[in-house]
Image (cartoon, grey):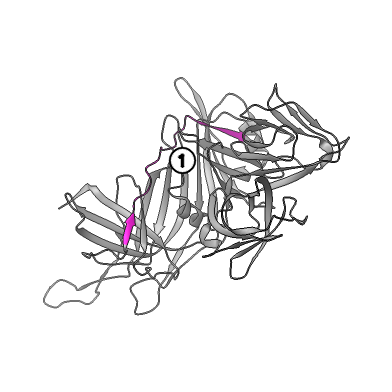
Amino acid sequence: MSSAGRVRMAYKKEATFGTAPTTPVLTSIPFNTGDAFVNSRDALISAQVQSTRGPRRTRLGVNIPAKGHSFELQWSTFDELLAAGFGNDWAGGIDVTASVTAAATSLTLASGTWAALGVFATDFLVYDDNGTDIILYIATITAADTILNVVAADQSTPVVLTVVGPASKTLIMGWTGTNVLASAANTIVWVAATKTITLAVGHGFTWLTKGFRAGDGIITVDSVSNDGWDKIASIDSTGLILTTVAALTDETINTAVTVNFGTDTGKVDNGSTLDSFSFEEQYLDHNSDVGNYRTISGVKINSIQFSVQPSSMIMVTMDLQAATIGDFSSASFGASTTDYTNREAFDSFTGAITQDDGSVDLSSFDFTLGNNQNRNFDLFERNARQITDGIPEMTGTINAFFDAETQSTLFFNETEFEIYVRMEDPTGYGYAIEINSAKFTGDTISIGDIDVTEALPYNVEPSTSEEVSLRRQPLAR
């Protein structure tokens, strides 16, 4: 007999849509109480009249397996599924340890592929070059995904690495980086009292335009007194003044010196490559690992909703749509199952929200990315041949206590805005949702017995860059 405490959900990414991988190592994921996959099949009732007043015959229609999977947000546990829902790969946000051979301008992997390790072209990385940290940009990956061809953090200047290897190296992967050339007019200033790093206007870019955000880890290389890792506490609305978490040393660079900055933050943008998975429901006996198993294949993520409510765990709900669902079996399709690491859940007590790079007070926030998927059925088949991805819809609602006309004015004037929601778990890991362009589609003001509140639904608007990003922010180093 199975008990709720012995139910397990596990999955594996598919190489071919709808085909479960052969004896893979499955990864289990947590879930809240609720339904398993539900196979909805229409009852097809015969229209033929029975002269004997007997019942009409019934057939069942095509398989439509689906599941709403709700969970409390945890660091790293759902990263592969989150990326699939966004339709893209993660860029950075991980440490990769591998055996590599370094040539002057490249890093060659001893075995396997860089993609399997989560390393892709256009990523940045921090590399220990014979005892000195340097920030590199991956220009291209060649030779069957085994050789990283790298340049400097400005994405063009050649580098000369120390030739070494094969040797075990840990690459700290991030999604952005930059170098800053100082001069008498265009300075870089570190101030200990305020823990700030300020760029002069003349540099022609800001911390924000280079992709740095609050909560990101940041490394400084080639300063005089401030090299090393830190965390970004905030960036002001001009984008020129970055405030750190840890202490700094007073320093001003006003000569022709290039200082490099990088991050260990990862990012996934909304894209067009929505991976599929095979899931397995494992109903284990209450006192052994014997049980019943059910395989669901061709699973795609039709939507993801993030909900941040007061005095609550941060909840994520995925709408999982599948092509096929099997009958129960006494054996798993996997060789084994690796249990997830049970980490601290994110809650609504630690984090921050900014709107147009300024602080804003909200009482709740939710965001939904919908992929508008549709099953495609062929004649004489009960299972979908494919699940196609439609035009995405990115929507949400913010709620606030009405204490100013700011949000209502944005709605009235159809003004587009940016919003950035940073969330931290109790140990310091972070995620952040970044919406680059949104527009309110309504404004409902509610007058209660005590409070006046307003609810404002919004749509995400097309942007010159990615419309929505999810960032993963590791612990401070």
Where residue 164 sits: x, y (%)? 64, 57
Q: Quadrant of the C terminus?
A: top right
For the residue pair 161 and 154, the one nearer the viewer reads as 161
Residue placed most toward the observer, 79 or 312: 79
Magenta stretch holds residue 341: yes
**Image-based side of 112 in relation to 331, left or right:** right
Answer whether residue 356 is visible to the viewer in this image. no
| Picture coordinates of residue 80, whole percent (x, y) | 47, 54
Q: Residue furthest bottom?
A: 380
Q: Which residues are magenta?
A: 336-354
Main SS type for the magenta part? loop
Task: Establish if 127 lies above or below 309.
Answer: below
* Above or below, comparing residue 443 to residue 127 in the picture: above
Q: Which residue is nearer to you in this view: 325 or 232? A: 232
Q: Which residue is mark 1?
A: 307
Which residue reaches farthest right?
184
* Quarter of image, res 361: top right
Classed neighbour count for the residue bearing mark 1: other residues with Cα under 10 Å, few (<14), some (14–19), many (≥20)? many
Q: Secondary structure at mark 1?
A: strand
Give amino acid for label 1.
Ser
Q: Position of residue 226 (x, y in %)?
A: 70, 33
